[in-house]
């Protein structure tokens, strides 16, 4: 049965092209008046598909609404690699025209093929996309014994992944590059370790599989907030490990939420907020350009290159930030005129604000706001064991006063669409 003209059929296609398509996918393509896809995908169609072939323009995402609108009265098929709803064009289409207008016919994805070839269970394998995204995102997923699949942007991605593994102390990791999966005549499997990887770039249609193995002297970084202070490059302006863990607990990040980190210093709060889940977003505001640049380096090193670093002094620098924020952390500059007021005004209903200070002046300010808005006011004190002559004693760090509160006022808010775009390739 031919779908109605207003419905868009999304057909997943593999490296084996027409030969690998199921009959419903073939029928949809033969009945189409317009077929939209990447040039490589359009080239897989036989002459029997008589539809007009339209290649996606670059950049893709901004062009989607106009291109679909131009053909709204015709029968349209869109080609996608493998499963269109998994790191594919299906997401962009659903967000543009609505899921009710889509008929999605998936094909086995390269992830399915890769796990099948390697004997890896899909549910225990983490997937990171390097298509249109920095390869540094792999660093956040590096844990001894974990298995990763990296969706490659091109033929150079395997070399970049191997270099990153070596730089992060995961050189002993097993690396597999699986090319042109699904095309029996062209499939290729190259294997080695990151330490010894010297393979020249091969086919651009590839996926990189990594069995993570940490080198003996590489620091172990856990999956929860409170990374060692030594994981960061800093000049002393760093929320220390145990206070940082307590601060993230008070901020309570959840998937997809946005944090404003005011007075970011080395960026540690924003970095660890984003490390809690790949969908978490954060903006770090730091007035010192040297520290702002350092925060960006820390973010890339620790696997969250998507951290946005804004150089400027708050509250002025808050204008134009993405928002509204789900949470705000103030780690510096509390006494700046209008800062607390601006942050409170920016919070929607249910938004959280956490502020830390070590000075009496800022503590008095937090006490007044606590008296006005409630929440929780606590003092965090940490002492470390140090040598005292031939014995051991406690050295007390400066106590930190922390105010955390949830904004209970009712305000309207809208949630912006994710910045991630679908990948049609």
Image (spheres, rainbow, N blue to C red):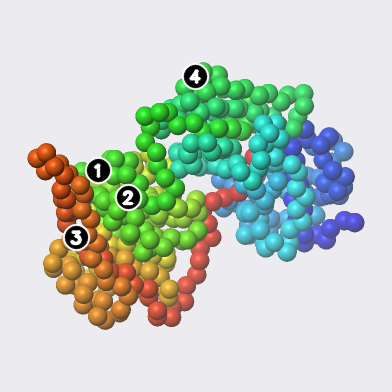
Look at mark 1 in the image and give the residue it sits on: 234
Say what secondary structure mark 1 lies in.
Answer: loop
Q: Do the residues labelled 1 and 2 touch (CB within 8 Å)?
A: yes
| Residue at mark 4 | 196
Sequence order check: which comes first, mark 4 or mark 1? 4
Write down the quadrant of residue 14 in the picture: top right
Q: Position of residue 300 (x, y in %)?
A: 39, 41
Dot 2 surroundings within 10 Å: few (below 14), some, or many (20 or more)?
many
> Going from the N terminus, do you reach mark 3 or mark 1 first?
1
Q: Which residue lies furthest to the left in this view?
A: 389
Image marks 3 and 1: residues in contact by CB distance under 8 Å: no
Quadrant where the image shows the N terminus: bottom right
Q: Which of marks 3 and 2 is nearer the N terminus?
A: 2
Image quadrant of residue 151? top right
Q: Which residue is tagged 3?
A: 399
* 233 is higher (above) or lower (below) than 154: below
- Using the numbered discs, state the Cα–Cα distance from disc 3 to disc 1 in whole angstroms: 20 Å
Residue 333 visible? no
x and y, in percent, of residue 76 in the image: 77, 52
Seen at 80% across and 59% down, the residue is 5
Q: How far apart are marks 1 and 2 (CA)?
A: 10 Å
Name the mark on residue 268: 2
Single out the mark in the foreground, 3 or 2.
3
Mark 4 and mark 2 in contact (Cβ < 8 Å)?
no
* Mark 1 nearby-residue class (10 Å; few <14, some 14–19, many ≥20): some
What is the C-alpha distance between the residues marked 3 and 2? 19 Å
Going by the image, does 422 lie left or right of 237?
Answer: right
What count of labels does the image hold? 4
């Amino acid at each position: 049965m031919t779908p109605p003209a207003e419905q868009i059929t999304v057909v997943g296609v593999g490296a084996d092209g027409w030969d690998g398509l199921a009959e419903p996918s073939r029928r949809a393509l033969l009945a189409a008046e317009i077929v939209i896809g990447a040039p490589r995908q359009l080239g897989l169609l036989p002459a029997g598909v008589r539809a007009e072939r339209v290649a996606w323009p670059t950049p893709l995402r901004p062009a989607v609404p106009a291109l679909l609108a131009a053909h709204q009265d015709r029968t349209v098929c869109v080609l996608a690699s493998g499963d269109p709803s998994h790191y594919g064009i299906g997401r962009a289409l659903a967000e543009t025209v609505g899921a009710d207008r889509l008929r999605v016919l998936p094909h086995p994805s390269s992830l399915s093929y890769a796990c099948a070839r390697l004997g890896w269970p899909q549910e225990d394998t983490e997937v990171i996309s390097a298509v249109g995204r920095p390869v540094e995102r792999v660093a956040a997923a590096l844990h001894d014994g974990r298995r990763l699949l990296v969706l490659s942007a091109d033929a150079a991605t395997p070399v970049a992944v191997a270099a990153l593994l070596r730089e992060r102390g995961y050189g002993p990791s097993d690396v597999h590059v699986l090319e042109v999966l699904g095309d029996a005549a062209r499939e290729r499997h190259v294997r080695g370790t990151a330490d010894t990887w010297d393979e020249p770039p091969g086919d651009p249609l590839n996926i990189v599989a990594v069995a993570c193995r940490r080198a003996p002297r590489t620091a172990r970084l856990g999956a929860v907030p409170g990374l060692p202070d030594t994981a960061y490059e800093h000049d002393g302006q760093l929320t220390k490990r145990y206070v940082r863990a307590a601060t993230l607990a008070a901020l309570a990040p959840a998937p997809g939420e946005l944090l404003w980190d005011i007075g970011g210093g080395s960026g540690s709060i924003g970095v660890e907020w984003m490390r809690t889940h790949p969908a978490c977003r954060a903006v770090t505001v730091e007035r010192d350009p040297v520290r702002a640049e350092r925060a960006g380096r820390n973010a890339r090193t620790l696997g969250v290159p998507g951290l946005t670093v804004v150089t400027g002094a708050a509250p002025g620098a808050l204008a134009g930030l993405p928002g509204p924020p789900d949470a705000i952390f103030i780690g510096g500059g509390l006494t700046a005129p209008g800062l607390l007021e601006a942050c409170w005004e920016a919070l929607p209903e249910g938004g959280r604000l956490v502020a830390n200070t070590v000075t009496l002046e800022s503590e008095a300010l937090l006490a007044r706001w606590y008296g006005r808005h409630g929440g929780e006011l606590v003092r965090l004190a940490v002492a470390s064991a140090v040598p005292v002559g031939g014995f051991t004693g406690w050295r007390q760090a400066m106590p930190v006063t922390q105010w955390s509160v949830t904004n209970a006022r009712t305000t309207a808010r809208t949630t912006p669409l994710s910045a991630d775009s679908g990948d049609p390739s």
